[in-house]
Amino acid sequence: MDYQMHFSFLLFIFSLLFLLLQATPEDVFVGVNIGTELSVMPHPTQVAALLKAQQIRHVRLYDADGGMLMALANTGIQVMVTIPNEQILGIGQSNSTAANWVNRNVLAHYPATNITAISVGSDVLTTLPNAAKILVNALKYIHSALVASNLDHQIKVSTPLSSSIILDSFPPSQAFFNASLDPVIVPLLGFLQSTNSFLMLNVYPYYDYMQSDGFILLDYALLKPLPSNKEAVDSNTLLRYTNVFDAMIDAAYFAMASLNFTNIPIVVSETGWPSKGGSNEPDATLENANTYNSNLIRHVLNKTGTPKHPGIAISTYIYELYNEDLKPGPISEKNWGLFDANGKPVYILRLTGSGLVLANDTTNQTYCAAKEGVDPRMLQAALDWACGPGRVDCSALLQGQPCYEPDNVMAHATYAFNTYYLQMGKGSGSCDFNGVAAVTTTNPSHGSCSFSGSVGRNGTMANITAPSMNSTNTDSSATAFEYNILSCAVMMVGALLGSSIWL
């Protein structure tokens, strides 16, 4: 009996440690949506390299493209995949169809690709009303497939809702969901609550401003600081609002509370501002787009929260990474992106003091070069590694090719090191090579050998999932957390196994 009790206790400890290892710390984030309606869509490896260079750690895809998921493998980037609207009817009517979708689009890539959420459609209630009645079924079937694979704790399931379904949104305390949608909204909120998921909300202050007939101030929509006499006051709660974004989030909180749901977190699945518009869209400008997105990023990452829930930050996905020139509709529809198809920023975000995420100024180029005076044998070993396991295409170093001259290890190593540095998105530790390389702002180009100091521009990028030669890891905080937990696990298990000798 003692042995059975001891064995059961060991199983309990192992189960607890497994859960702890899964529960790595999560914090508020700003991510991006990645649309694909471009006449020249960058290759998935170029997309992944741009994300790494911009320190973007969270993305939402509008599908579950296999090439993109492969390119995002082993990057640590957290990925939300999407079931397109046209597939919801089939999935909502068949548990097996849902299971097949999860097998094909999630299990085939996880855990190498860090899929953390599945978006079931987008704006289904407003764009595909005949699928609304089976929307919740689709969420349940997808969740059941995740449960069957023991992934329901790691991967959440939700569906983005347009903020337009929230009526009477100001003052926020009076907000409520369109009552005609209650037969869907109530079970949807019940599902989100029971699965510890989140409400996904598309929030577009640009459209609220455009449709307000002058009632909403432009500065209020752009999250600009307002004098106190310009702030909007909720007459019921006396809460003061300085921007549309917060007011819409609180309207969603109050609308959920009106249906007796008070503990469902919110993630903003889309928000942004267009940088260009037609003659009837005078406020779709570069300056306004920059102002909105810069202020938004600071607002989210500063963990300001909202007047109703101060300090409870709202993780947000910006719409969007690229300008989508094939989007139908007005000019503004094609100009929501932060970058063009070549990876060039549409505008330089003003993010001083907000960390490295989306610090998209590519004017100050950096390069990776071999250090002077290092051991030539170590330099040669690093060069061999870069052109071998590091997966750098070193064909430009062959005799007769542009970077062959000067034919010495220093010049060849600098070419290989810089190429690897770019492939890895200029990530932390990607320019070290056991101490024989360093980052520089001096362009090492010479003669016919041209070096690039930017990521995501024209040209094919090699696969960014190349292994690292160095011990430095860009996810050091998460790695340290897991290492500490694992150390505790080893010590605890060791102690328990030791004690078992005496039982």
Image (spheres, rainbow, N blue to C red):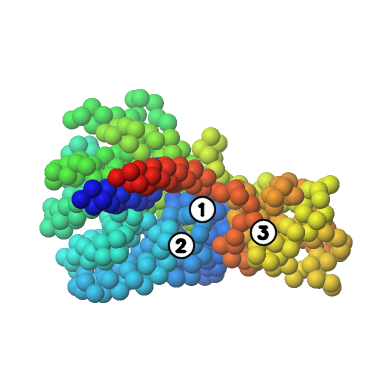
Crowdedness of circle 3 by 10 Å Cα count: few (<14), some, many (20+)? many
Residue contact between numbered discs 3 and 1, judged by CB atoms under 8 Å: no
Q: Is residue 225 above or below residue 218?
A: above
Query: Residue 398, image x and y in percent?
Result: 80, 71
What is the three-letter code of the residue carrying label 2? Ala
In primary-sequence order, the first of circles 2 and 3 is: 2
Q: Position of residue 200 (x, y in %)?
A: 30, 52
Q: Residue furthest top?
A: 228
Q: Give the Cα distance between marks 3 and 1.
A: 25 Å
* Rendered view: 41 above or below 12: below
Quadrant that contains the C terminus: top left
Q: Is residue 284 left or right of residue 420?
A: left
Residue 50 % position (x, y):
56, 56
Identify residue for label 1: 338
Amino acid on which disc 3 is placed: Tyr
The answer to which of marks 3 and 1 sits earlier in the sequence is: 1
Q: Which mark is residue 112?
A: 2
Q: Mark 2 or mark 1: name the one nearer the start of the chain.
A: 2
- For image coordinates 26% across by 39% down, the residue present is 250
Q: Nearer the viewer, residue 251 or 492?
A: 492
Distance from Cα at disc 2 to Cα at disc 1: 27 Å
Q: Residue at x 80, y 56 (%)?
A: 377
Tell me: 370 left or right of 250.
right
Q: Is 258 or 156 nearer to us in this picture?
A: 156
